[in-house]
Image (spheres, grey):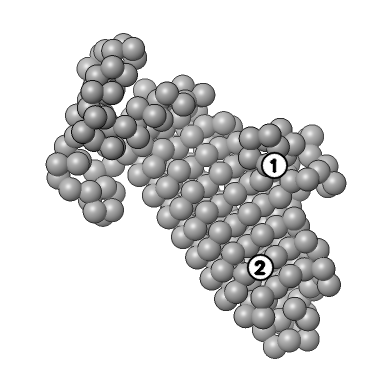
């Protein structure tokens, strides 16, 4: 797209190698670098810096002073590395958000990509570091900060100024209180809070809002009590959770999350 077209403010700087759909708008003083691709009906506000390799999908809204696709802050990162950022569709990215390229450390596993999915609500001053994977329909409140290689699944709510240690996973439908410090993996459906964070029950209100039935929530609560309250050892927990998983896909999700945990479970 040429900078002379009406949706591009005359003060914006668009590299000739950038690929912008004709419906993309770019605000005053924003900079779009080479190897940046932006899908239709995405709105880039003023004073935004977009660096490639970067792919942005459709119908995103990017607010002022955000920096997306910049080289990561990992000391090993080099500009010529085959790493990138990919952002899906329908995301809201508010002021001063930073989303940085992956590193060669994740090349075999994720292709060196930092990835944000679809429908995420990302508030001001959020930092998504190198090699992070953020799923769909998450709410990241002001000041959330992720170290490298963090995975956020789907439908997660992260309270303001939540800090997440590198390589941690935050399971689907979970919620963290403001100022939480996450040092271990957060089980799906969990409510966590504290410094360091501890389980505080299940995210029952969030589950109701997402359409979970009373019966489904009751089973998830029973699984929570088994894992965090019963005092059973993990081998026994896995056996009993596997039995519950035969009739509950939510228990199956919890069991699979435990089996694949690398940082160990927050308990």
State the separation of the CA atoms marked 1 and 2. 20 Å
Q: Which percent across, then down, holds residue 232?
A: 26, 13
Residue 88: quadrant of the picture: bottom right
Q: Secondary structure at mark 1?
A: loop
Q: Nearer the viewer, residue 145 or 38?
A: 38
Q: Is residue 85 above or below residue 131?
A: below
Q: Which percent across, then down, holds residue 239?
A: 28, 17
Residue 39: quadrant of the picture: bottom right
Question: Which residue lies at the image location 53% right of the left edge and 63% below the top edge?
Answer: 89
Question: Which residue lies at the image location 66% right of the left edge and 59% below the top edge?
Answer: 55
Q: Which mark is residue 2?
A: none
Confirm whether residue 43 shows in the render: no
Q: Residues within 10 Å of mark 1 (few under 14, many from 20)?
A: many
Question: Which residue lies at the image location 63% right of the left edge and 46% below the top edge?
Answer: 114
**Circle 1 is placed at which residue position?**
112
Q: Which percent across, then down, holds residue 136?
A: 46, 53
Q: Secondary structure at mark 2?
A: strand
Q: Is residue 115 above or below residue 47?
A: above
The residue at the far front in this view is 246
Question: Which residue lies at the image location 59% right of the left edge and 42% below the top edge?
Answer: 132
Q: Which mark is residue 38?
A: 2
């Amino acid at each position: 797209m040429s900078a002379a077209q009406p949706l591009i403010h005359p003060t914006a700087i668009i590299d000739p190698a950038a690929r912008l759909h004709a419906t993309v708008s770019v605000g005053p003083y924003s900079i779009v670098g080479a190897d940046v691709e932006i899908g239709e009906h995405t709105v880039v506000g003023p004073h935004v810096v977009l660096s490639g390799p970067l792919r942005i999908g459709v119908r995103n809204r990017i607010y002022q002073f955000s920096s997306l696709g910049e080289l990561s802050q990992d000391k090993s990162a080099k500009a010529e590395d085959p790493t990138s950022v990919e952002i899906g569709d329908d995301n809201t990215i508010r002021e001063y958000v930073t989303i940085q390229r992956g590193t060669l450390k994740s090349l075999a596993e994720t292709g060196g990509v930092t990835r944000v999915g679809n429908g995420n609500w990302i508030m001001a001053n959020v930092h998504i570091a190198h090699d992070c994977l953020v799923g769909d329909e998450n709410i990241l409140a002001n000041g959330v900060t992720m170290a490298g290689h963090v995975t956020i699944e789907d439908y997660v709510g992260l309270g303001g100024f939540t800090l997440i240690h590198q390589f941690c996973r935050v399971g689907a439908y979970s919620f963290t209180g403001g100022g939480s410090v996450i040092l271990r993996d957060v089980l799906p459906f969990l409510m966590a809070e504290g410094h360091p964070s501890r389980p505080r029950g299940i995210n029952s209100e969030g589950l109701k809002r997402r359409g979970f039935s009373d019966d489904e929530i009751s089973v998830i609560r029973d699984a929570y009590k088994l894992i965090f309250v019963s005092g059973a050892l993990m081998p026994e927990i896995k056996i009993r959770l596997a039995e519950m998983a035969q009739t509950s896909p939510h228990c199956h999700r919890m069991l699979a999350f435990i089996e694949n945990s690398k940082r160990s479970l927050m308990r």
